[in-house]
Amino acid sequence: MYGRDVFMESLQAHGVRHLFGNPGTTESPLIDSLARYPAIDYVLALHEGVAIGAASYYAQACGRAGVVNLHVAPGLGNAIGMIFGALRTNSPMVVTAGQQDTRLRLRDPILGHDLVAMAAPVVKWSVQAESADEIAPVMRRAFKIAHDAPSGPVFVALPINVMEQQTEVAAGTAGALHRAPPPDAEGVAAIARHLLAAREPAIMIGDDVARARAGEALVALAEATGAGIWTELIHQHQPVPNRHPNYRGRIPSDPAAIAEAFGAADAVLMVGGPFFEEVWYAPTGPFPDGAAVLQIEESTERLARNHGLDAGLVAGLGPALDAIRAQVQEGASDAYAAAAAERNAGLASLRDEERVERQECLAAIGEQRPMPVPVMLEALATAVPEDVVIVEEAITGSPEIPRAFSFGGHGDYFCGRGGGIGQGIAGALGVKLAMPERPIVCLSGDGSAMYSIQALWTAARHRLPIVFIILANAEYRILKNNLDIYRERFDVATNHPYVQMDLVDPPLGFVEMAAGMGVDGTRVTEPDALAAAVREALASGAPYLIEAAVEGKV
């Protein structure tokens, strides 16, 4: 059989349903083979970054590896930024690129370069198949490594002549792998002891809690200990219900502020994340003085990577959390149980106060125009069905989203990680393909949208009914905010204008751009008009874009 057939059959063996890509000449063996593999849908993107972003979010939404097909050095180069985001998001992905004929290697062929070296810094494993005999074992290992904790992208270069070679080595998989080890009894006991000794415990969670479907177990432990639950500053999932009384929201962006947010916590349990992706340096650490630092991870790679621990445990997150909760409940005195109940009541009361404050804030700013983001999101929340999925890259507006919407856990909310922009609009494609039965609303800032606006064409081509809402404030607001913080933190005594941070000359016309790519759209300036447009868009069964004018930074 040909190498190209082994490649395609490897995809089939691993259950691949969608192949995201932007092809070129060296991908001819793959493209020419698609007709013989109708179960694999090729999702065509007009830019490599869009293909990567869509595949990354697809993987996050359904748990299967996203597979991408790129074109030699320029195509891989165009995709590198988005691959970095997939790496930081821990998306299991197999990224492939066609490579020039290996017999041309010493002749500097057009578009030729060392693809393995290019990809290596942003993937877990980078390799080139040197013969058709290697394609099957390379693909088998690629899928395995992509799913090994912490999951992430791998890269495979496929020279065109290798794809055309004959081989007897057939496609196969690594088999049924049970990767999550059972929790070690001593580790469980150690963490339980620290939690039982704590007067003010706090829990810090990462996206792995959502991916492991361990949110329910996490909430049960929080209730048993009376601990507040915090998420990372930038997180792709909502691991636990955001309306739960113990949920405290996202942590701040620098260690001193994180420690302040934890308050009087004397034990901090971190579960399923890199901890912490800081923005600003501080000489102090992120934990309150004297607090016990505890961690549970699915791999040794993350355990104690950034912080020394008082107790650490590698195990499947759900079973580990259940075991720790059981020991806490078994070892809890009446006084401890009463204190935990009192802490839970205090957290519930705090959430009630925050809801009242938010309603007062909305009332105070409700008539301002352009619409403040909280007002715009409140109107949106009234217009969408309960089973809506929010895919967002609102950046400065992100903290307001969980205040407006109710998320039950994994699958209700997706956001990008790593800090690179342009992931939202591209990612919504992948989420819709992974969750076709649910309505998808994608929120993106205008600056972010311009990085992957070509995704609208793919939505139209593949008839993906996604409502794209552009929060149009005609600026890079996050950069303005960070410039202010920079001046304060480094004592820079300037008050210069925000140079090159406004998107007004000329203005961006998203409705016109959408129309040029086959997507209908409208502009809105009022909350009621936004709600009406969203309802109409959801009912249309087609992709639709809404450009919503929102308040900028003066």
Image (spheres, grey):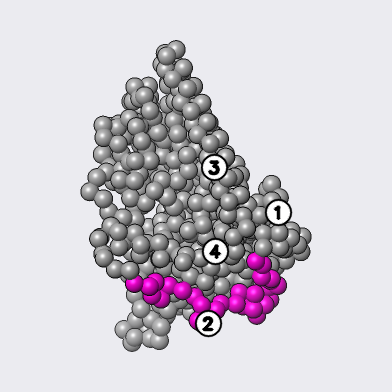
Q: In the figure, 429 relative to 199: above or below?
A: below
Seen in the image, is 169 located left or right of residue 549?
Answer: left
Callouts 4 and 1 close, C-beta under 8 Å = no
Q: Which residue is mark 3?
A: 357
Residue topped by disc 2: 506
Q: Residue furthest top?
A: 334
User: Which residue sits at x=71%, y=63%?
Assistant: 529
Which residue is depicted at the point 47% across and 65% down?
553
Q: Is residue 509 magenta?
A: yes
Above or below, 218 against 225 in this view is below
Q: Tag 1, which secondary structure?
A: helix
Alpha-carbon span between mark 2 and mark 3: 39 Å
In primary-sequence order, the first of circles 1 and 2 is 1
Write down the region rendered in magenta: 496-525
Camera-side residue of 385 and 221:
385
- Residue type, numbered disc 2: Pro
Residue of label 4: 551
What crowding class fits label 4: few (fewer than 14 Cα within 10 Å), some (14-19), or many (20 or more)? some
Position of residue 308 relative to residue 436, above or below, is above
For the question of whether residue 305 can be seen, the reply is no
Q: Are marks 1 and 3 in contact (CB under 8 Å)?
A: no
Name the spot of residue 374 as percent of width and height, x first. Answer: 57, 54
Q: Is residue 212 magenta?
A: no
Of pointers 4 and 3, the one earlier in the residue sequence: 3
What type is the residue that disc 1 sits on? Ala
Q: Nearer the viewer, residue 320 or 438?
A: 438
Q: Is tag 2's residue or tag 3's residue first in the polypeptide sequence?
A: 3
Dot 1 and dot 2 residues touching (CB under 8 Å)? no
Quote the CA–CA distance across marks 4 and 3.
Answer: 20 Å
Res. 218 visible in picture: yes
Q: Which mark is residue 383?
A: 1
